[in-house]
Amino acid sequence: MKENIATLAVWDAFRNPSECPLCSLLEKAEEKYVEFYLVNIMQPEARIAIEKTGYCKHHIRLLYQRRDLLPLAIQLNDILTIRIKEREKMFRNLIISAEDAGENNKKKGFIFFNKQEMQKESTCLICDALDKDRDINRRITIELWKKHDDFKELFKSSRGFCMKHEVDLIKTAKKRLSGKLFKDFTSVMDDIQKKEYKRIKEELEYFIDQYDYQNANRPWKTSRDAVPRVIRKIMGNAIVPEIKPKGPGE
């Protein structure tokens, strides 16, 4: 298959050990999009997209944490201007329907009000971009598995995937692989995931045992960062701050 930028990125993600290569791809993409919408705020296309869609709570937090407050303030001002206009329209319709004697019109007015509010809360420019990337990365992974033996070996030697991407990959493979190829893929996936869940569970249990006073002088081995890695294994590309664990007596 054609070695475009997205395909090369998938190869690189599988070459670098992590609890989920697809999560690693999304984390890098997320950083790229956060940086893009702070740096390119004055581009008309970006301004229009920001005004129309806005951000979810998670990505507003990431934008704010960059401490580049002027471009964020400009974006927030645009979003606030649009939201105030939308609010005025919603309340105007709500008041008109409330004044109407018919009970059906009152219900319709509130349904419209509630629908508009839900739509605002469920849109995010960066989430939309990541959803597209997520779909592309899954499709590329399956196509590489199908066409490249080298990638298949790389896949088998990985640390597996988070729980969400495990399911997503199986669903994508079902659509893009047939017969024996799909059977082989699911079998390999099952073997990898069982092995890697066992590994990371043992690391977590070792971490827990470190807090027994009898193990005060025992080395941490690979368990020191077991908690954030388990969170990522369960939750996907969750942002987990690095925290140095304390042993007994520390």
Image: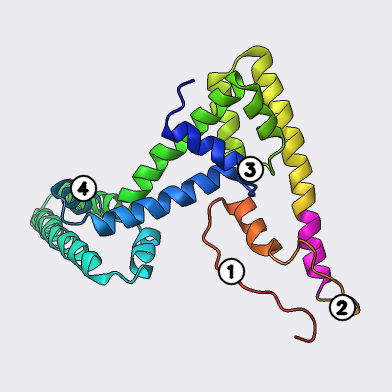
Q: Position of residue 5 (x, y in %)?
A: 42, 34
Q: CA distance from mark 3 to mark 4?
A: 32 Å
Nearest the eye: 14 or 23: 14
Which secondary structure is most common in the magenta stretch? Answer: helix
Q: CA distance from mark 1 to mark 3?
A: 21 Å
Residue 223 appears in the picture as rendered: yes
Amino acid at dot 2: Asn
Q: Disc 3 marks which residue?
A: 161
Label 1 CA crowd tier, 10 Å (few <14, some 14–19, many 20+) = few
Q: CA distance from mark 1 to mark 4?
A: 33 Å
State the extent of the magenta-drawn residues as a range. Answer: 201-210
Classify the position of the C terminus by image quarter: bottom right
Mark toward the start of the polypeptide (1 vs 2): 2
Q: Residue at x 69, y 27 (%)?
A: 186
Is residue 91 part of the magenta span, yes or no? Answer: no
Front: mark 2 or 4 = 2
The vertical placement of 221 against 2, above or below, is below
The vertical placement of 240 against 127, above or below, is below
Q: Disc 2 marks which residue?
A: 217
Q: CA distance from mark 3 to mark 2?
A: 33 Å
Front: mark 1 or 3 = 1
Nearest the eye: 168 or 20: 20
Q: Disc 1 marks which residue?
A: 242
Nearest the eye: 16 or 245: 16
Amino acid at dot 4: Ala
Label 3 CA crowd tier, 10 Å (few <14, some 14–19, many 20+) = many
Residue projecting furthest to the bottom: 249
Q: Which mark is residue 49?
A: 4
Indicate the secondary structure of the residue bearing disc 4: helix
Q: Is residue 231 left or right of residue 247?
A: left
Amino acid at dot 3: Phe
Indicate the secondary structure of the residue bearing disc 2: loop
